[in-house]
Structure formats: C-alpha cells, structure tokens
Image (tube, rainbow, N blue to C red):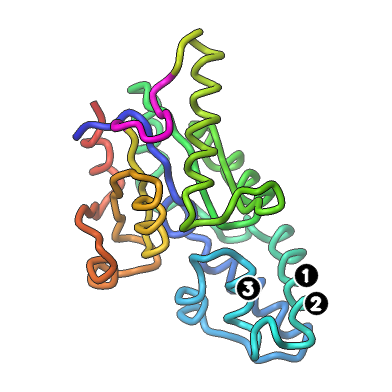
C-alpha cells in the first residue's frame, strides 16, 4: 500500500546514537563508582526510554540508593554530548528529502528525552515537521503506548490545516500512515496505534529478533522506503 505519512522512530532507525548513549552511561557509571558497560550491552538496554536504559545499567536498578543521582548525571552529560558521534545512517538524509519532495508528511516519535529528541531532529532533519519525545509529565505515555504516535499525527494534521486550510493526511487511524522502526518496541507501538510497521535492518535489532516479535515487512536500505510512497 502506498503511504503519504511516515512516523519514524529515532535511535536505530534514523540516527546511530549508540556510541553517544554508551559514553554518557559509562560517564555516569564512573562518576558514581559503578561498573561500566560495553557498547553491545547498551545496544541491548536501549529502546524503552533513558530511565529504563539506566535501570538496566545501574546495579540493582532503581532500587539502588544512588540510582537517581546516576540518572541525573547521565541526563546532564547526554544533553551536552548527544552530537559528539551521532550521525544519520547512510541514505537516511536522501530518503527523507525524496519523501518531502513528494509531499509526504514526516514525524519522529521517540522514548528519548523530549529536549534531546527535538534538538537532534532540528540539527539533522529539517524535513521532519514534528518531533515527539518522552513527555509523560504532560500525560503522553512513552512507547509502546500509542500516545506519541497519536500526538504526532494530531500535530501533523494541525500543521496541514494551517498550510492548506483543510485537514491533511495523517489523521489518527489514517490508512495512508505507516510507522518505521527498528525494534520490538516499535512493532508494539505500531500495533497499538493501528498502523502498519516497516522494520529496518540497519538498527539495534536483527532480522530474526524482529521476526520473533511479529515483524513482516523489512527494508535493508533507506531507499526502499521511498518505493512505499504514492
């Protein structure tokens, strides 16, 4: 089915953020006398937001008496260093440019902190209209709840009204919207949002893992996503 609205995950889908996340986690570990982790460990820990990332990294998780201090150290360090080595995957920028040229609506939804999500999207992806990060304080539950997707679609629709004076494609439940991600969390988010899911194979999870979690549609290169447009 051809699509006109694309909701993208960020980490592992558009951006390779793994090295910067690992650096900030291990900085926090060192500052608080905790054991450091390999990049492969961090790869397994990511996907459910930075708090759960740190719960997995800190010995004893949130029950550790020093957890909140370590989490605060991580957040502060990551906000200062989220652009050190993070880059788009090969072909991502070109893919987004083509989608935009074809009139598609583009958004990002992430379990990353709202400020970091919006900063990264502004820096790397001017084609993307809406970026939604972790914002549970505002009543928007993190993925795999559908809240971030619905909020992104709502904002896209509002922008479409402003531009054209009529509703844009990308309404909640629209049949021409698709979710693009790299993980089991993304598959569950798409399912909970009532959207089809395209699973990318260059991210943080491999094909068999994704198949085991219900993935059925895969792309091996960003250029393949262009073929799904009208």
Disc 1 crowd, CA 10 A, few/some/many (<14, 14-19, 20+): few
Residue 80 position, x and y percent, is 74, 59
Q: Residue at x 38, y 23 (%)?
A: 169
In this rendering, position of residue 137 left or right of residue 55: right
Q: Nearer the viewer, residue 102 or 107?
A: 107
Is disc 1 in contact with disc 3, using a CB cutoff of under 8 Å? no
Position of the N terminus, as image quadrant, is top left
Residue 170 in the magenta stretch? The answer is yes
Q: Nearer the viewer, residue 8 or 184?
A: 184
In this rendering, position of residue 40 left or right of residue 210: right
Disc 2 crowd, CA 10 A, few/some/many (<14, 14-19, 20+): some
Q: Nearer the viewer, residue 70 or 17?
A: 70
Q: Residue at x 49, y 24 (%)?
A: 157
User: What segment carries the magenta color?
Assistant: 168-176
Q: Is residue 155 above or below residue 113?
A: above
| Residue that mark 2 sits on | 69
Residue 142 position, x and y percent, is 56, 56
Is disc 1 in contact with disc 2, using a CB cutoff of under 8 Å? yes
Could you give the CA–CA distance between mark 2 and mark 3, rounded to whole angstroms? 17 Å
Position of the C terminus, as image quadrant, is top left
Residue 77 position, x and y percent, is 74, 66
- The residue positioned farthest toward the top in the image shown: 165
| Residue that mark 3 sits on | 23
Q: Earlier in the sequence, mark 1 or mark 3?
A: 3
Report helix, strand or loop for mark 1. Answer: helix
Q: Nearer the viewer, mark 1 or mark 3?
A: 1
Q: Residue at x 69, y 47 (%)?
A: 138
| Residue that mark 1 sits on | 72
């Amino acid at each position: 089915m051809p699509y006109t609205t694309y909701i993208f995950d960020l980490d592992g889908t558009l951006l390779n953020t793994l090295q910067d996340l690992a650096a900030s986690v291990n900085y926090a570990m060192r500052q608080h006398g905790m054991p450091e982790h390999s990049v492969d460990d961090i790869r397994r820990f990511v996907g459910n937001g930075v708090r759960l990332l740190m719960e997995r990294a800190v010995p004893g998780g949130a029950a550790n008496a020093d957890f909140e201090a370590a989490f605060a150290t991580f957040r502060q360090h990551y906000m200062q260093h989220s652009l050190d080595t993070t880059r788009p995957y090969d072909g991502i920028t070109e893919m987004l440019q083509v989608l935009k040229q074809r009139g598609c609506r583009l958004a990002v939804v992430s379990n990353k902190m709202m400020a970091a999500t919006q900063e990264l999207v502004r820096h790397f992806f001017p084609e993307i209209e809406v970026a939604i990060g972790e914002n549970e304080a505002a009543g928007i539950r993190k993925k795999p709840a559908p809240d971030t997707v619905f909020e992104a679609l709502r904002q896209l629709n509002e922008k479409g009204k402003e531009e054209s004076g009529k509703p844009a494609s990308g309404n909640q439940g629209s049949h021409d919207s698709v979710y693009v991600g790299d993980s089991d969390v993304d598959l569950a988010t798409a399912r909970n949002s009532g959207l089809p899911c395209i699973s990318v194979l260059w991210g943080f999870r491999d094909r068999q893992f994704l198949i085991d979690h219900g993935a059925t549609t895969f792309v091996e290169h960003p250029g393949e996503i262009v073929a799904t447009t009208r």
